[in-house]
């Protein structure tokens, strides 16, 4: 059933349905906006490397999902879907994360034509052996470029420190060696296994008729139901693989990112609750409004590049914080001490106003179509409703936050990744 | 069907204008204040650091923690320093957004409170002995110096920045947004305080609001909040110095850095088309050349010939400078540049197809109608309009783009001339010069 859901408190509504072929459909009407956006996500990303096909476990090189994303745009006869849609005035793009490949466009008019093109090129591959070989050069360039990017290097340094074998530690784009192993045949096999409606979500946002979106979706996807392969569930120890990962680059300031693994294999609302608890805990500890940040900033130990994040993907979760800091080790020590202090009890008024601000942030995030679509798609794949996040956050207490900091933010769990300055 | 936004203009006081865009479609309201300073190498670093120093504390909220606590009570309103270079104007100020009052308790008056806080930041900073606080100035000066040095980290924008610096060495435009290192290092509490006090009475100020509130209410809030703003002779915003053609042969510059991929930056003068600028034609021509995935450069240099990883063109409409930026393997630098120049020569000759023009026009139409769906985009575009003295709406630009003809873009292409090229090449770090 194509069902309408209302969220009066945040002024949103949406329609949802799981079609017979297994496709998750989410339609968000937005009055008075010129743009419309469609976001088609495949629950298959860079870390989905080992899976079971016809009773056999298969290992694939790193970079396959991302490679497939590049080649999906190829249309029959060698034309490119991006070009075709850009000609109509649409903005088209795609990205691959460790757990998702997403194709999306936004446009002012011609929405349904573009939707047809989008669903068409994502579900029907047209690449050839030759075009796959040609693409290797382009992707090799992308890999090289990412290797020049200090943020990328410090991030994957942290992940290699945290995880021993989980493929989330390897760059989604792959490496020069790994992509050399990729063939058209492998890409086709991954496509036919994972690009099935039951493993996909279509989210649209904008002032378009929801019924028509639903009817088009039903018509444009295959009618068949089939399930995507099961993926390896990696077991990781709670302690990090390495405590310190460092490299040298020509950067203007020493750069660091520290972090720790948190809970794994959470599902549905339980996962949302944990994610929100993590976000609020890090917020109370490290946000710009926190006493610690104010001290570190005033002392010049950190600058405005300092930030923190919590990520949950592929059955694992971890938090990280970092930025430019010559005395990174000292910053990490101060964070640990402050976490210890807060886990003993958080000032009630401070926590209440941080929560009030976080509720404001959640509301502000609803302005962005891209953010809405991404989070609704993640929710559809993960079995929860993003629009309910705000009401779940209300129930998170000081005790939850103290508990999070006490359990997860401890010296033995932390890994430090640094980029040291190499003199020119 | 395009939904038109209503907008209202107010002259708040001498040299202070307010633009209000009225709409209920966002969850938030947004306010910005921009001090339009002439870009100048003597003051650029001081201007760049100023909003960051002012953001640290005010008379009634003397430190970051008390400001943040106040913003938390306004449902996590955000108020951030903003620094932009638009042509030869350096715009400094603040951007704030906050939840729409429909989602808050009754009578919180978030707009008035945010405008008051912003005005206090600008007019009544935390002081010690009549000067800006030493600790705030020192930390923010260090941060500015770190930011200037950090420009090196982003190789792409570093190459573009270097090109502008070299190509426009005799123009104010060469001054980077953050100012120069040498000037940043010279900042002291005394010089910055003096500069701040001299700046306020003479600077032109653009204020922007977008949200659901009655524009008259916003105008009252702004008038009240800024009532103590000193106003003297307002320095008229100096027009951009337009260079219609390069001084001589193409100038070549290069630098070596430890990187895996070379960067190529090519700077053009838009030239004759800047005499009576047709904004829509300029933007369409840029889109056609290198602004969208159907552009000449993207389709040919990258897609067909695989000469680079990325290539795009950008246009400063205020200054009339067009910049092409590309990431290239070192051995392909020559071929990539040749192909870029060849494509431009073809465009100058009118050798392009109708679909290319149509695609470029559509991209501008889409971009400007999409602006209406985003508060930060509206803010930015209205600042541009204000600086150009244009009393138009984004929807008008979209409509004008629909009208752009083959002859219009051809006129733009014919005028553009290559002035300087900057290459960032791979060099071993052991390679000390």
Image (tube, rainbow, N blue to C red):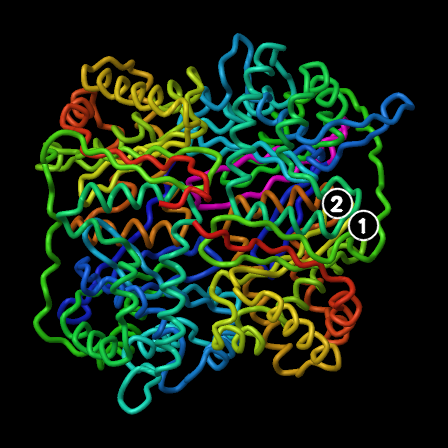
Boundaries of the magenta span: A18-40
* Residue B10, horizontal then vertical, whole percent: 20, 64
Q: Residue at x 24, y 58 (%)?
A: B90
Examine the rendering and report whether any part of residue B413 can be seen: yes
The residue singled out by tag 2 in the image is A382
Which quadrant holds the C terminus of chain B? top left
Magenta stretch: includes residue A319: no
Work out how far the residue at label 2 is from the one at label 1, CA to CA, in angstroms.
7 Å
The residue singled out by tag 1 in the image is A267
* Residue A134, horizontal then vertical, whole percent: 55, 16
- Looking at the image, do the residues carrying marks 2 and 1 touch, with CB atoms under 8 Å apart? yes
Instruction: Report the chain holding disc 1.
Output: A
Q: Residue at x 63, y 74 (%)?
A: A334
Q: From the viewer's side, name the closer residue of B30 and B9.
A: B30
Q: Earlier in the sequence, mark 2 or mark 1?
A: 1
Task: For label 1, count other residues whose C-alpha is less than 10 Å away and answer few (under 14), some (14-19) or many (20+).
Answer: some
Instruction: Report the chain holding disc 2.
Output: A
* Residue B354, horizontal then vertical, whole percent: 29, 15
- Asked if badge 2 and badge 1 are on a common chain, one would say yes
Q: Residue at x 38, y 71 (%)?
A: B140
* Residue A293, horizontal then vertical, whole percent: 55, 73
Q: From the viewer's side, name the closer residue of A251 and B419.
A: A251
Q: Residue at x 27, y 64 (%)?
A: B45
Q: Quadrant of residue A1?
A: top right
Q: Secondary structure at mark 2?
A: helix
Give the vertical position of A385 relative to B233 (above or below).
above
Residue A203 as seen in the image, left or right of residue B80: right
């Amino acid at each position: 059933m194509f069902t309408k859901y209302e969220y009066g408190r945040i002024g949103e509504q949406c329609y949802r349905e799981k079609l017979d072929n297994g496709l998750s459909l989410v339609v968000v009407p937005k009055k008075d906006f010129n743009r419309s956006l469609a976001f088609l996500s495949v629950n298959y990303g860079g870390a989905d490397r080992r899976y079971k096909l016809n009773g056999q476990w298969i290992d694939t090189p790193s970079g396959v999902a991302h490679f497939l994303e590049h080649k999906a745009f190829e249309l029959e006869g060698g034309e490119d879907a991006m070009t075709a849609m850009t000609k109509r005035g649409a903005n088209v793009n795609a990205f691959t994360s460790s757990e998702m490949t997403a194709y999306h466009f936004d446009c002012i008019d011609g929405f349904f034509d573009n939707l047809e093109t989008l669903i068409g090129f994502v579900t029907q591959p047209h690449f050839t052996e030759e075009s796959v070989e040609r693409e290797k050069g382009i992707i090799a360039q992308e890999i090289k470029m990412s290797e020049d990017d200090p943020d990328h290097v410090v991030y994957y340094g942290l992940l290699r420190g945290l995880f021993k074998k989980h493929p989330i530690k390897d760059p989604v784009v792959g490496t020069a060696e790994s992509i050399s192993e990729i063939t058209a045949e492998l890409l086709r096999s991954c496509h036919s296994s994972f690009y099935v409606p039951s493993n996909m979500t279509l989210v649209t946002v904008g002032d378009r008729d929801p019924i028509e979106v639903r009817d088009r979706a039903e018509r444009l996807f295959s009618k068949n139901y089939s399930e995507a392969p099961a993926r390896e569930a990696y077991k990781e120890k709670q302690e990090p693989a390495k405590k310190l990962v460092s490299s040298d680059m020509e950067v203007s300031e020493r750069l660091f990112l520290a972090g720790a693994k948190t809970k794994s294999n959470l599902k549905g609302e339980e996962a949302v609750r944990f994610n929100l608890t993590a976000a609020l805990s890090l917020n109370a500890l490290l946000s710009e409004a926190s006493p610690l940040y104010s001290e570190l900033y005033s002392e010049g130990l950190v600058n405005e590049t300092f930030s923190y994040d919590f990520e949950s993907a592929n059955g694992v979760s971890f938090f990280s914080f970092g930025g430019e800091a010559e005395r990174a080790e000292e910053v990490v020590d101060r964070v640990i001490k402050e976490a210890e202090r807060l886990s003993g009890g958080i000032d009630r008024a401070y926590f209440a106003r941080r929560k009030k601000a976080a509720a404001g942030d959640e509301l502000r995030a609803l302005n962005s179509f891209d953010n809405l679509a991404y989070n609704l798609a993640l929710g559809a794949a993960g079995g929860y409703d993003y629009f309910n996040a705000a009401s779940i956050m209300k129930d998170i207490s000081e005790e939850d936050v103290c508990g999070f900091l006490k359990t997860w933010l401890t010296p033995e769990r932390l890994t430090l990744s640094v980029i040291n300055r190499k003199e020119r | 069907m395009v939904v038109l936004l209503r907008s209202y203009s107010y002259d708040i006081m001498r040299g202070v204008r307010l633009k209000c865009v009225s709409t209920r479609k966002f969850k938030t309201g947004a306010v910005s204040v921009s001090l339009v300073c002439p870009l100048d190498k003597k003051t650029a670093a001081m201007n760049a650091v100023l909003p960051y120093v002012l953001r640290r504390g005010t008379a009634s909220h003397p430190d970051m923690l008390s400001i943040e606590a106040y913003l938390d009570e306004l449902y996590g309103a955000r108020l951030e320093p903003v620094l932009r270079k638009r042509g030869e104007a350096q715009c400094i100020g603040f951007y704030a957004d906050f939840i729409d009052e429909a989602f808050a308790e009754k009578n919180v008056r978030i707009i008035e409170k945010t405008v008051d806080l912003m005005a206090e930041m600008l007019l009544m900073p935390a002081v010690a002995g009549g000067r800006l606080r030493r600790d705030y100035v020192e930390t923010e000066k260090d941060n500015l110096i770190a930011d200037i040095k950090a420009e090196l980290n982003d190789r792409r924008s570093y190459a573009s920045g270097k090109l502008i610096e070299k190509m426009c060495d005799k123009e104010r435009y060469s001054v980077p947004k953050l100012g120069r290192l040498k000037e940043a290092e010279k900042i002291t509490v005394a010089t910055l305080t003096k500069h701040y006090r001299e700046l306020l009475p003479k600077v032109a100020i653009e204020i922007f609001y977008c949200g659901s509130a009655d524009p008259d209410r916003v105008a009252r809030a702004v008038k009240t909040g800024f009532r103590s703003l000193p106003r003297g002779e307002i320095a008229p915003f100096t027009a951009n110095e337009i260079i219609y053609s390069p001084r001589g042969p193409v100038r070549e510059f290069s630098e070596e850095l430890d990187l895996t991929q070379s960067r190529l930056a090519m700077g053009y003068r838009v030239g004759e088309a800047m005499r009576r600028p047709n904004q829509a034609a300029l933007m369409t021509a840029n889109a056609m050349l290198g602004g969208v995935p159907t552009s000449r450069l993207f389709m040919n240099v990258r897609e067909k010939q695989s000469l680079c990883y990325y290539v795009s063109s950008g246009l400063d409409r205020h200054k009339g400078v067009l910049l092409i930026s590309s990431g290239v393997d070192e051995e392909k630098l020559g071929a990539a540049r040749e192909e870029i120049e060849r494509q431009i020569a073809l465009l100058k000759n009118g050798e392009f197809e109708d679909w290319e023009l149509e695609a470029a026009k559509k991209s501008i139409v889409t971009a400007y109608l999409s602006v209406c769906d985003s508060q930060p985009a509206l803010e930015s575009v209205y600042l541009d309009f204000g600086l150009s003295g244009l009393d138009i709406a984004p929807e008008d630009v979209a409509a004008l783009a629909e009208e752009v003809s083959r002859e219009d873009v051809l006129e733009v292409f014919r005028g553009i001339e290559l002035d300087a090229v900057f290459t960032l090449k791979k060099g071993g770090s052991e390679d000390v010069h």
